[in-house]
Image (cartoon, rainbow, N blue to C red):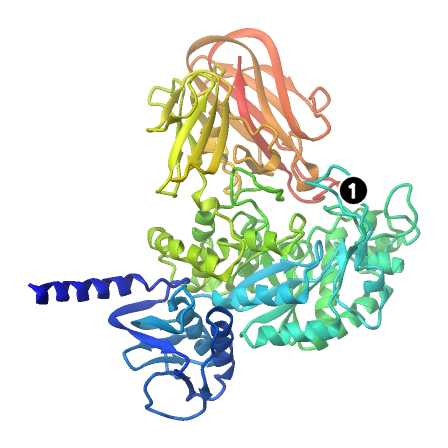
């Protein structure tokens, strides 16, 4: 009997060890073995392959930081036991950086296809270490064969809006390294600050690196703190960071913004502007670094002075960054200054250019030609497609995927970074716990991203190098907030970019539970939104009322409710049928009755609430609303949450047309809807609102039309558009909101299609 128990225990131990193999991103092949290898201070690192010193150094640094000891490193060929052997293997792969790893009783062997592959093997080894400080570390025995799917695996950091010191930038690079990413896109110049020392132009940092105040709260803000703010990196610090990254097989791509987002440079050298004598602020004096967020009309003038300035700047940048690519921005460049500049208009005529978009193409093309002459290539945001793409430019597609699709079809290299999946400045929770720029991007959506658009054939898809996440820092003023916004989403994106296309959310979720323990072990600040109490509003079977459903990934807690109709805190047992206006408070508590998460939901009922609804044009996948079309009649409103509310449905450049089936003939006299006006985010009021009615759902009659003159546009934020009319007996109601269209010059997002944001539709 004892023998059987021992055998069962041994099998259970083997199973337990197999379960301990939790690696993100998921390796291509993992074969768990029985038993463990015990690592201690007496274990040697043997460098059988030349050039593996960086990997050994990184591993020793990690051991020292988290376990308090290091391993001796020797350069010998040896069959010695109790060792970690770093060497090279031939591995079948398409992207450099493949590796094999074998952990057995005697040693750990890591063989890379190159030194970078050895380094990635070390990252997997680190994830096999126990998460407790001990002098001997049991590592499960395993065989791994692994390689990356995409060659470009990146993270971006905006140090222009807010400045972060060298120590944190290095820490950020370590995060990138530990998830087998290989590119750090460093955003160094902005309207709100110039962050890199240029010796030929000292005012860029003495003047351009500092602003005299910053808005308080979300744009347009609740005042200004009037505090001088800024900072910059010396060239020696830049060199230090570039070397630090290179030691981790990470390429640093600098971004020097042009021709827009250039206010800080213009503040330092006003001659860079088309109108050097015009003050930055109305009623103010001189050029200044911007103190608020957004897009500003004062951009680089395409003059010989500007081009010489930029060439001199880029000469110094090139000396600091050995990367093949230099990012030159190219996004959000208003054309208003160029349109009213006599110099620009004459230049357009001289060069035979069609318009100001072609002038931007000329600007980018001239910079590209210069950088190409220096052996470098440019990357720009997808706006550089407008007016014609520079011959050798690579495109970073952020306004959705279309820019990347167009560029790939033109045989230009592409990095995908669409806002709906890759903007880590968007909120991770529907229950906003801090100010963010807006949007809702949970980890599940990041994990669902596929960087190769279905619109590309196999040959075109080869031009998609990979993807990256962008971290814009308007509302990230400290390093804790940066960590909070990237974790755990960086884990999901790393698997999207490294592992195979056939991803499995359930498997990732299990490994993610272990990853949260690793975050605690690292002492990083991370979002726990994954465990938030999540509320859903669903249609009923007969379209009478709505179901209010609650759930959480936190399985050890309990959910309790409080409503206006009930005694305090009753246990949640399943979806609740709501048939009239009400308000719910729901709490998720742990075993100590501490509240972990709360949700407040108000319902306002009208004749359309819970009814069938169809949309002629579907909203953008980036802003699908809470339940799609049903979110327009679910009785819930975005309220004062602004753009952060998941209730908004958004259409980019398209109209909204909805048909609601009231279920039976009814007398109605008013239709209203919520729209969001936030022009700084390119969200504009609709051009018109039309209400039509029908008895059969086929033949419709117009009962109201509101044009821009009669519409209650308001001053911004949430507006309620109301159409009152002579009472009409009807069953079907059609609401048509005409999109604002192309944004005109002088307004935020000029030249781009406007967003139309719509929330609840009410019928009374």
Instruction: Residue 88: name its quadrant.
Output: bottom left
The residue that mark 1 highlights is: 224
Q: Can residue 259 be seen in this snapshot?
A: no
Using a 10 Å C-alpha cutoff, classify the residue at mark 1 as few (fewer than 14 neighbours), some (14 to 19) or many (20 or more): some
Residue found 65% across the figure and 60% down from its top? 380
On the image, the x and y values in percent for residue 758 come to: 57, 30
On the image, the x and y values in percent for residue 482 come to: 60, 54
Nearer to me, 84 or 680: 84
Q: Is residue 412 left or right of residue 268?
A: left
Instruction: Residue 105: name its quadrant.
Output: bottom left
Q: Can residue 53 be seen in this snapshot?
A: yes
Residue found 66% across the figure and 41% down from its top? 681
On the image, the x and y values in percent for residue 676 come to: 63, 31
Q: Quadrant of the N terminus?
A: bottom left
Instruction: Residue 538: name its quadrant.
Output: top left
Q: Secondary structure at mark 1?
A: loop
Nearer to me, 383 or 720: 720
On the image, the x and y values in percent for residue 386 come to: 67, 53
Q: How many marks?
A: 1
């Amino acid at each position: 009997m004892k023998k059987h128990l021992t055998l069962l225990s041994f099998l259970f131990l083997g199973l337990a060890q197999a379960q301990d193999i939790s690696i993100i991103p998921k390796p291509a092949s993992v074969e768990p073995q029985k038993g463990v290898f015990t690592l201690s201070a007496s274990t040697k690192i043997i460098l059988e392959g030349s050039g593996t010193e960086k990997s050994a150094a990184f591993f020793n640094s990690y051991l020292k930081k988290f376990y308090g000891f290091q391993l001796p490193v020797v350069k010998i060929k040896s069959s010695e036991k109790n060792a970690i052997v770093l060497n090279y293997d031939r591995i079948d792969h398409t992207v450099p950086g493949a590796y094999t790893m074998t952990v057995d009783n005697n040693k750990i062997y890591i063989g890379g296809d190159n030194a970078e592959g050895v380094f990635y093997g070390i990252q997997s080894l680190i994830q096999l270490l126990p998460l407790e400080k001990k002098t001997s570390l049991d590592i499960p025995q395993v065989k791994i064969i692994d390689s990356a799917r995409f060659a470009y695996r990146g993270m971006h950091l905006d140090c222009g809006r807010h400045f972060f010191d060298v120590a944190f930038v290095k820490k950020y690079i370590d995060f990138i390294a530990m998830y087998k990413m290989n590119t750090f896109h460093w955003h160094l110049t902005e309207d709100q600050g110039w962050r890199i020392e240029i010796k030929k132009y000292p005012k860029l940092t003495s003047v351009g690196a500092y602003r005299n105040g910053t808005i308080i709260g979300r744009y347009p803000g609740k005042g200004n703190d009037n505090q001088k703010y800024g900072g910059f990196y010396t060239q020696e610090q830049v060199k230090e960071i570039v070397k630090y990254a290179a030691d981790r097989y990470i390429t640093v791509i600098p971004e020097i913004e042009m021709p827009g987002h250039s206010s800080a440079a213009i503040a330092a050298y006003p001659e860079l502007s088309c109108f050097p004598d015009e003050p930055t602020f109305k009623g103010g004096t001189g050029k200044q670094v911007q103190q608020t967020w957004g897009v500003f009309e004062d951009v680089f003038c395409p003059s010989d002075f500007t081009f010489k300035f930029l060439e001199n700047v880029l000469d110094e940048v090139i000396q600091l960054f050995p990367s093949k690519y230099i990012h030159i921005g190219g996004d959000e460049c208003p054309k208003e200054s160029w349109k009213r500049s006599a110099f620009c208009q004459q230049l357009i005529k001289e060069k035979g250019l069609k318009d100001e978009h072609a002038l931007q193409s000329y600007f980018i093309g001239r910079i590209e030609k210069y950088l190409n002459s220096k052996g470098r290539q440019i990357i720009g945001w997808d706006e550089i497609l407008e007016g014609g793409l520079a011959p050798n430019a690579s495109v970073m597609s952020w306004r959705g995927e279309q820019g990347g699709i167009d560029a790939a079809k033109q045989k230009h290299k592409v990095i995908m970074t669409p806002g709906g999946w890759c903007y880590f400045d968007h909120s991770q929770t529907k229950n906003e716990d801090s100010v963010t720029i807006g949007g809702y991007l949970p980890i599940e959506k990041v994990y669902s991203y596929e960087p190769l658009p279905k619109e590309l054939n196999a040959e075109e898809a080869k031009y998609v190098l990979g993807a990256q996440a962008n971290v814009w820092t308007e509302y990230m003023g400290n390093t804790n907030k940066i960590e909070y916004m990237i974790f755990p989403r960086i884990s999901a994106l790393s698997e999207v970019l490294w592992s195979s296309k056939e991803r499995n959310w359930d498997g990732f979720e299990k490994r993610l539970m272990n990853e949260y323990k690793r975050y605690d072990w690292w002492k990083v600040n991370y979002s726990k939104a994954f465990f938030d109490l999540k509320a859903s509003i669903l249609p009923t079977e007969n379209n009478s009322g709505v179901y209010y459903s609650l759930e959480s990934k936190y399985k050890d807690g309990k959910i309790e409710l409080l409503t206006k109709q009930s005694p305090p805190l009753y246990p949640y047992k399943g979806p609740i049928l709501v048939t009239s206006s009400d308000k719910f408070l729901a709490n998720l508590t742990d075993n100590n009755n501490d509240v972990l998460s709360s949700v407040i939901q108000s319902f306002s009922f009208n004749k359309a609430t819970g009814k069938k609804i169809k949309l002629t044009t579907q909203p953008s996948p980036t802003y699908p609303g809470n339940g799609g079309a049903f979110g327009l009649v679910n009785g819930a409103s975005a309220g004062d949450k602004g753009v952060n509310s998941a209730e908004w449905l958004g259409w980019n450049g398209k109209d909204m047309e909805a048909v609601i089936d009231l279920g039976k003939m009814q007398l109605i006299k008013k239709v209203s809807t919520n729209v969001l006006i936030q022009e700084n985010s390119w969200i504009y009021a609709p051009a018109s609102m039309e209400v039509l009615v029908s008895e059969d759902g086929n033949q419709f009659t117009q009962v109201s039309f509101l044009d821009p003159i009669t519409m209650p546009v308001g001053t911004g934020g949430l507006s309620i558009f109301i159409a009152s009319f002579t009472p009409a007996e009807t069953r079907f109601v059609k609401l048509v909101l005409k999109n604002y269209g192309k944004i005109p010059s002088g307004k935020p997002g000029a030249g781009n299609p406007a967003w139309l944001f719509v929330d609840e539709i009410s019928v009374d």
